[in-house]
Image: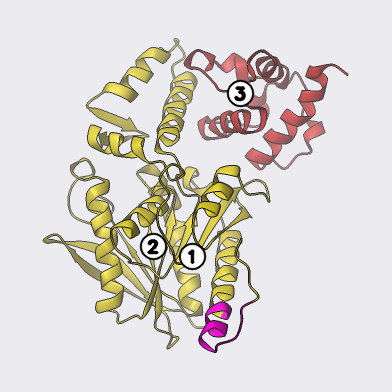
Amino acid sequence: MEKALEQVVEISTDGTSLHGVYHQSRSEAKQGIVFCDPFAEEKKCAHRVMVETARALAASEFNCLRFDYRGCGDSPGHFDQFGPPQWLEDITAAAAYMRSHAGLETVGVLGLRLGATMALLAQREQQLFDFAILWEPIVNGHRYLKANLQRSLIKAMMTDTGGFSAAEVRQNHLQAAVLDFDGYAVSAPTRDWIDTVDLLADPPDFSAPVLILNIGSRDQVRGEYQELAERMTDATARAAILEPFWNRIGLISPQPVVEQTALWLAELQVQHTKHTAGMPSNTTTK
Amino acid sequence: MSEAAELKPQIKQMIVERLFLEVEPEQISDEENLMEAYDIDSVNLFEIVVGLEEVFDVSLEDADFSLETFSTVNNIADYILQNRG
């Protein structure tokens, strides 16, 4: 299989240009996938896996676009100047880029953690994507913030040998004007936006096919992902055994998640082929 | 078999799975210091906290975050027995 071409691109959004990398498949297929990165430190840890996944999918027949949200990575601005409302616009701009500049007819999205959640929410505003691949989406923002608080407590516990004040850590987490999110300065509006996310209470109306991929130590899908899949029109939840690479620094092969993703995409194509040929589909997605 | 004796193999299984340790669960002794024996850092400890919540239905409060709580399988078992819902 030949290596795909990679090209740095600029994606226009709200008067600025986002940094992107377009992985052009050598296939003639007019289909592509927009990658939506996770948040803050998770983006940094997941970078290599996202790059390798884009390369793997482009080496088959999906053109892939990775990009940095405003204030993140190589896109202009500072992290604390922007937040989810702007990042949803950036996702919309990336989807538009794939259809207009790259001329693709079928465009899906692959999001990780908060990136997966934002991809779904961007779709709520307008029908951007023909399919979605959600790797460990954040279903409940309040729990996501609580997990960050727990991480802060653990760090304080392990590093402050003179004894740490849990109340102080909590106070900083919940009430400071700028939240220390694993070393990233998160503004109060962003914290509040995340806090209100609840995909089960308010499931996105995403009628296109969706893969929810539970990534962890067990070949078993967590209850919240099963429930989310059941609340969507055409979603399936599966599990892949892999370390939580978005929390790790080091070399982790993305093979299990790439394989599960490629398998689902192949099933989707079979389904699509049968549908366009007027044949009944035997594939069930739930 | 006491509740603690039933819990300990499950705790060891959870630790091995969530930390992707290359040891058999039964190789972990009840009293050994987990931090030292398995080089547990803050990322690993967070995985154990999530495992406690998901597998054993305990919800950790701020005051529960002490190295003592997580130092051995025995301590973790005691904590679960005192706090699970």
The residue pinned by badge 1 equals A53
Do the numbered discs 2 and 3 sit on residues whose CB atoms are within 8 Å?
no
Q: Nearer the viewer, residue A65 or A32?
A: A32
Rendered shade, chain B: red
Instruction: Determine which residue is flagged by label 2.
Output: A35
Horizontally, is A124 left or right of A274 in the view? Answer: left
Distance of mark 1 from mark 3, alpha carbons? 36 Å
Which chain wears yellow? A
Kindly check if marks 1 and 3 are in contact, taking CB atoms under 8 A apart as contact.
no
Q: Which residues are magenta?
A: A270-281
Magenta region includes residue A276? yes
Q: What residue sits 28% from the left and 22% below the top?
A: A175
Q: Amino acid at mark 3?
A: Val
In this figure, which residue is indicated by the disc labeled 3? B58
Residues tagged 2 and 1 counted as in contact (Cβ below 8 A): yes
What amino acid type is highlighted by mark number 1?
Thr
Name the quadrant containing residue B31: top right
Q: Can see residue A225?
A: yes
